[in-house]
Image: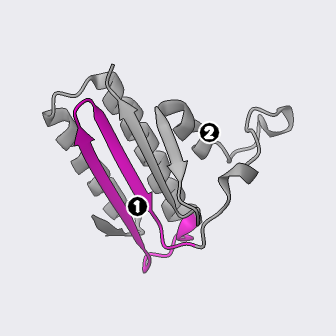
């Protein structure tokens, strides 16, 4: 689904996805991990990728196969190289107010990768 790069639209979409996962009898811990990573991916797409421009679109795709739930979030931005991100656990960054989104997504998911351009992230969370 494509949504405008606005928090009001993103909130509604995230609530719909959350409700849909709840109806699937998904393990609560798995759902929390997935929704946490999805929220971060959407926040990064709106803020960094689309620069908060409500005219730009964010695409969110979610699929469930067996005991796995996968999402791809694509923004309209220029992309970035995730390998250049500093480790937010470094002592000089511990009190920095930003820069933990990708680290958090990696921590919450079983698999996470970016496309070559760096404007789409795909991740999977597996039920135990």
Could you tell whether 118 is left or right of 120 in the image? right
> x, y (%) of residue 123?
44, 44
Q: Residue at the spot x=58%, y=62% of the render?
A: 116
In the image, residue 101 above or below residue 118: above
Label 2 secondary element: helix
Quadrant that contains the C terminus: top left
Image disc number at residue 37: none
Q: Are marks 2 and 1 in contact (CB under 8 Å)?
A: no
Quarter of the rendering containing residue 80 = bottom right
Identify the residue at horizontal 39%, vertical 54% (top origin): 72
- Residue 115 vs 28, above or below: the answer is below
Q: Residue drawn 55% across and 72% down? A: 77
The location of residue 7, given as percent across then percent down, is: 40, 61
Q: Nearer the viewer, residue 95 or 91?
A: 91
Q: Quadrant of the N terminus?
A: bottom left
The residue positioned 54% from the left and 64% from the top of the image is 119
Q: Name the side, left or right, on which 11 lies relative to 102.
A: left
Q: Quick one: label 2, few (<14), some, or many (20+) residues within 10 Å?
A: some
The magenta segment:
49-77
Mark sitting on residue 103: 2
């Amino acid at each position: 689904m494509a949504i405008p790069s606005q928090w009001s639209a993103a909130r509604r979409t995230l609530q719909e996805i959350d409700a849909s996962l709840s109806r699937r009898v998904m393990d609560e811990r798995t759902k929390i991990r997935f929704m946490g990573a999805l929220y971060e991916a959407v926040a990064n797409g709106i803020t960094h990728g689309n620069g908060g421009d409500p005219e730009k679109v964010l695409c969110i795709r979610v699929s469930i196969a067996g005991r796995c739930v996968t999402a791809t979030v694509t923004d309209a931005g220029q992309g970035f190289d995730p390998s250049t991100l500093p480790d937010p656990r470094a002592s000089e960054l511990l009190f920095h107010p930003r820069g933990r989104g990708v680290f958090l997504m990696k921590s919450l998911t079983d698999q996470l990768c970016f496309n070559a351009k760096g404007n789409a992230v795909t991740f999977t969370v597996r039920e135990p």
